[in-house]
Amino acid sequence: MEKWDSNEGTSAFHVPEWMIQFADQKQEFNKRPTKIGRRSLSRSISQSSTDSYSSAASYTDSSDDETSPRDKQQKNSKGSGDFCVKNIKQAEFGRREIEIAEQEMPALMALRKRAQGEKPLAGAKIVGCTHITAQTAVLMETLGALGAQCRWAACNIYSTLNEVAAALAESGFPVFAWKGESEDDFWWCIDRCVNVEGWQPNMILDDGGDLTHWIYKKYPNMFKKIKGIVEESVTGVHRLYQLSKAGKLCVPAMNVNDSVTKQKFDNLYCCRESILDGLKRTTDMMFGGKQVVVCGYGEVGKGCCAALKAMGSIVYVTEIDPICALQACMDGFRLVKLNEVIRQVDIVITCTGNKNVVTREHLDRMKNSCIVCNMGHSNTEIDVTYQSISQCDFLVLKFYGIFLAQLYFCLGKWLKQSMLSSPLRAALIELQHCQASLRTPELTWERVRSQVDHVIWPDGKRIVLLAEGRLLNLSCSTVPTFVLSITATTQALALIELYNAPEGRYKQDVYLLPKKMDEYVASLHLPTFDAHLTELTDEQAKYLGLNKNGPFKPNYYRY
């Protein structure tokens, strides 16, 4: 039986025989179904658990919408209560959604069928923090079929599909997530995944780095048994590189975000389709003739710009990288600074992975009814609330309130500095920056519909803020399942590779996926399009200096 090991060396990726054989076979799921059951209820107005009004289009029983899942005692049909979801009774609806997603995720289903005999993840205990959707449910169930035990939380407080979380809980997966979590709920759910008696993870699958951060902060000793981290977002990868640079990364990590199959498919094609879906569902606006500024021209920005341009929008781009900036110019977009167009644009979209891209100063200068949204993973890009708030800051906010904290800060100016502790003094200084956010007394917040807020200025001007500055497409709409199949398959193979890698192959650093793995993932999806690859002859392969079976491009090649 083929094993997940390798020849000597630290960088080689050994492809098991079943992978090589399977790449050439016709898959059972190689055709998209001609008819897929239409969901009877629109998720565009699916109700958040934090909303104060009821939703006619929600799977949730309206009688318990206001009850926090943390206050409920729920059990699945097997009698297990090791989960926390909105309503376990939604499991049947969620199962139907998962079954629909399976039809559009051919490679992942094929991987599940082919590799489950070997159980390459037998003994793996994976703790995950991703968006909990029908697509990630297929990934989780695939990991389970390959032998892994999983515990899961959501990486975004708005992107969880309650019915899917219920279906996973009913199937026996310890899932702790629901749509509309508070910040406290968010960290509580992650802690419930990690801090459980008699179970300790040995693999991490993260999306954004919050899970990894929590374990480093609260349970650092767990890393003694963790074999590796798989991270798929630019935000999480940035955090990993920071840890590596500081010498604090104590396990190997796989950078899925910068793999070709993630960058060129998920980031580009997924966002090209889902940006329009998210904006339409939340605002019902027409795009033709609208002036839009897209902050960032990476793969996400490229996808957003292409979609909006095709709909007749006038698109501006902001960029810091001269290479991406030149690409934007040659693609027909005008490169500007945000300050130059902020008064005239109708829509502002951020997709940089950075923080404070759209500040309070920008927001003050926007025209009435300007739509503001974010397509990056983190909610740091739009200055909704000041981001650098520590635990000490939260204590000040809790016991004194912003007004008393400001008063205390002013009094502190007249006191000797030694009378204020350094952490408190630093916290109070940071709290002054809260004045630069949208969470200030002079601004009125008006909830229009789920994930849509009007922020109203004293003079009556208002902006339309979507998903409170969080990821638009997964918070307010859905994303193309087929594209997520590519990313999910890459994540699964990265977990298998790190878990089975012999000691010494990967050191305490951040690694990109082997090129052969990217090519393998792509090849599994080609039969869906009835696509036929051309094969090199022996003479051609020799001329190019390539193996006939790949990899076909060097690691430095830019697709």
Image (cartoon, grey):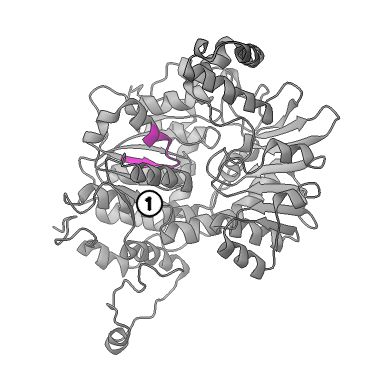
Q: Locate residue 550: give its quadrant.
A: bottom left
Question: Residue 383, relative to residue 116: is it above or below?
Answer: above
State the residue in front, 465 or 284: 465
Image location of residue 380, percent across then percent down = 57, 38
Q: Is residue 143 above or below residue 57?
A: below
Q: Is residue 365 above or below residue 305?
A: above
Is residue 243 at least partly visible in the picture?
yes
Q: Amino acid at mark 1?
A: Asn
Q: Quadrant of the N terminus?
A: bottom left
Element under disc 1: strand
Q: Is residue 207 magenta?
A: yes
Q: Nearer the viewer, residue 295 or 121?
A: 295
Residue at point 36%, 21% (across, down):
81
* Disc 1 target residue: 255
Give the residue at the far bottom of this rendering. 539
| Stretch of the chain drawn in magenta | 204-213
